[in-house]
Amino acid sequence: MKNPLPALFGVILLATPLATTAQQFGDFTYTSDGLAITITGYTGPTGPVTIPYAVAGLAVTHIGDNAFSANPNLTSVTIPSSVNNIGVAAFWHSYNLTSVTIPDSVTRIGHDAFFNCPLTNVTIPNSITSIADGTFSECRLVSVTIPSSVTNVGSYAFYNCARLITVTIPSTVTSIGDGAFVGCTSLISVTIPSSVTNIGSQSFLGCTSLVAITVDPANPSCSSLDGVLFNKNQTTLIQFPGGKVGSYPIPSSVTNIMDYAFYGCASLTNVIIPGSVSNIVDGAFYLCTGLTSTTIPNSVTSIGHDAFYNCTSLRNISIPGSVTSIGYQAFYNCTNLNKITIPGTVTNLGNYAFRNCPSLNRVFFMRNAPGVDSGVFYDASNVTVYYLPGATGWSATFAGRPAVLWNPLMQTSGPNFGAGPVGFGFDITGTTNIPIVVEATTNQANGAWVPLQSLNLTNGLFHFNDPEWIGHPARLYRIRSP
């Protein structure tokens, strides 16, 4: 299965080149350059740890890279005011560390410094100007106040902080990195100040409780409408809040939807896509498990890979004749999807496009057989493929599934055609057991077609009878696929 989230932070647990050989001070190892001390490790017992202010008459100014990495003995850490630098991954994966005191003397915290530490609360001092990539990734933070000294929030800085309820972004921040708040499943709302001119891709992906993203109207680069994040002129939909409920009509100003813009929106039930949109992008509705329907306009030419991945409530979807490409795994694990029609314009049907769709039993192709990989219907064992008369490239099977000619024909002559004592009737012939729907209208130009009967053409023959025909000044009939 393809994962939309990039692999995160391959931390290499290597010590920084040392100025001198590591020495021991109580439970700590350290190095010295003759001017200051760098703490490089801790060998003491389980419990709270206070890092010394000075060793051998020299101030402790640095906590070295990886100094406390994967150390199960730390439960809390107090950092002295002599320290100005916390190194890369210094507390990486210290899985019992629940609290840390960072003094105002610290001006730099290295990337991944507190990765996967179960911190519930942390105060970021006003001396910090940048929150580095992955700094608090996988922590258990309940709330975060970013100080006004900070101008940059790095990529994946708060990745998967699942208990994070509130976050305050000050007006000094100009940049929010890629995936900065990915997976913060308890985050309810976010306000983006006017100072932010750059928002990285998928910054709020998988924030399943997020109901509103609010942007200061004075922001020059982005905007919000009804809690949804857009670029400034609202031609690009950047992020739909993961906790927003119900049906959503995308504004007609939108021409572009960002990849994974609706990722994990489990309470979204319907989306109306305007005619201004030309592509359904990669992962657009990935994990929208509550999505039952969507309207795809004739302007759309492609459906990207993983576009409706794991949309388990989606039952039917109409693909317009403008679409030429359906991507890899586009409808993977759409477990309630029961039928689909592939227009003749489609020349590229991606592998595993309908993988693990156990309810899918009817796929109608409108023209010649497209070239596909054998796995397009993998684990969709109930599929029967139907094709039209005159189409080429078809055989008894298609991508490992039965392929059947769909050729129902109304017989307009013979003894069974015409008005009778119980209504107007005619015979329908065609391939045995093909599914059909008989519809009628009173106005071919602009009248509504009303379904009268759905059936399988048992033994290739069915006599249809309409007892209500006499009540209409005119009655026209047609047959369509169900």
Image (tube, grey):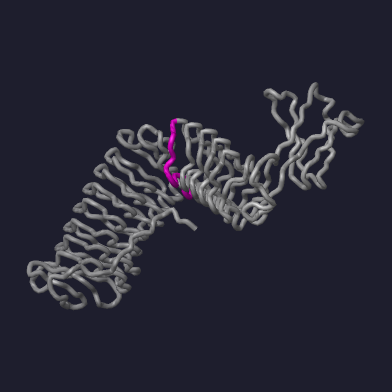
- Would you say residue 265 is visible in this rendering? no
| 370 vs 55, nearest the viewer | 370
Residue 254 placement: quadrant: top left
Instruction: Please provide percent x and percent y for residue 25.
Output: 16, 77
User: Residue shown at 32%/73% (left/top)?
Assistant: 72
Question: Magenta stretch?
Answer: 253-264
User: Residue shown at 22%/54% (left/top)?
Assistant: 125
Residue 356 as seen in the image, left or right of residue 49: right
Instruction: Please provide percent x and percent y for residue 380.
Output: 62, 55
Is residue 255 a member of the stretch shown in magenta?
yes
| 141 vs 375, nearest the viewer | 375
Magenta span: helix, strand or loop, mainly? loop
User: Residue shown at 25%/55% (left/top)?
Assistant: 124
Is residue 358 a member of the stretch shown in magenta?
no
Instruction: Please provide percent x and percent y for residue 196.
Output: 29, 41
Residue 65 as seen in the image, left or right of residue 302: left
From this view, report whether residue 418 is shown above or below residue 165.
above
From this view, report whether residue 463 is shown above or below residue 333.
above
Quadrant where the C terminus sits is top right
